[in-house]
Image: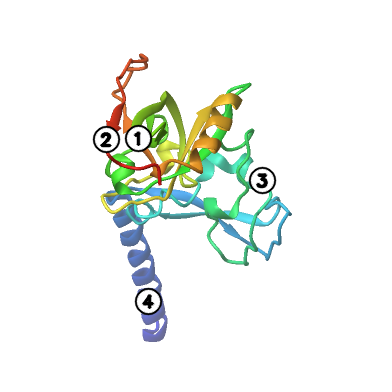
Amino acid sequence: MKPRNLLIAAAVLGLLAISLLQLEAWRTRGGTVYVFKATRNVQPPNTLNGAVVVVGIPGNTYEAMQSQVPTRDLQSWVVSTPVVRPVRAGETITFDALQKSASAGLKIQPGMRAVAVEVAAVQAVGYLIRPGDYVDILGTVPDEKNLVTRHLLQAKHVLAVDQQYRLEDSAFLQSRTYSTVTLEVTPAEAEMLEAYRAVVRNGFSLSLRGRGDLETVQTPSYQLLGLSRK
């Protein structure tokens, strides 16, 4: 074989070896996770049907984005759900680009409603509250001449934190923060929360319950004596 042909063959074998090494590295570092990329521009309110392709990425790369990026197991939902913002060709599809709905996103029980409350770290147990948890809602509200802290609602199901509504899609890394918690309530409870939202002092606070603890408890309520109803 001519020297030039030997060099070409060696180069091809070298590229093949590099590719095999990369594939082996992906496998040993967590395998391959399959996500979606847009093949063309899509404008709201169109769906991604016929406009995405499934691509594989290293599992360790996906770990940092799993709370934002749907995987192939959600393909039917991804391609049938309207987008809520422009999607560009070549863009990796993220949850925030897709419309949330009662049928394809939040699983709301018949007769119930989803209501979001604003929270900060101290009001959300240091951001430890996650979808699927149960919480009590506390608020400091006017009562005659004093301010009273009481349980407004008890054992309410957490549907979502911000737009993350599936526990398996959320990394909940140590630095993970959010600004809203969405709760499942009755229509009457939704009205009550909306009424209290205007008068509750410093916003609602959430108290996290242990797994399986759904019992309603009686509390005396705490009066802040000497404080006005400002």
How much space separates mark 2 and mark 1, taking CA atoms?
6 Å
How much space separates mark 2 and mark 3, taking CA atoms?
53 Å
How much space separates mark 1 and mark 3, taking CA atoms?
49 Å
> Which amino acid, mark 1?
Asn
Question: Mark 4 or 3 closer to N-term?
Answer: 4
> Which of the labelled discs sits on residue 11, or is there none?
4
Q: Is residue 196 left or right of residue 58?
A: right
Q: Dots 2 and 3: beta carbons under 8 Å? A: no
> Which of the labelled discs sits on residue 133, or is there none?
none
User: What SS does tag 2 mark?
Assistant: loop
Residue of label 2: 225
Query: Mark 1 or mark 4, which is nearer to you?
Result: 1
Question: Mark 2 or 3 closer to N-term?
Answer: 3
Residue of label 1: 146
How much space separates mark 1 and mark 4, taking CA atoms?
82 Å
Q: Quadrant of residue 23?
A: bottom left
Question: Mark 1 or 3 closer to N-term?
Answer: 3
User: What SS does tag 1 mark?
Assistant: strand
Residue of label 3: 81
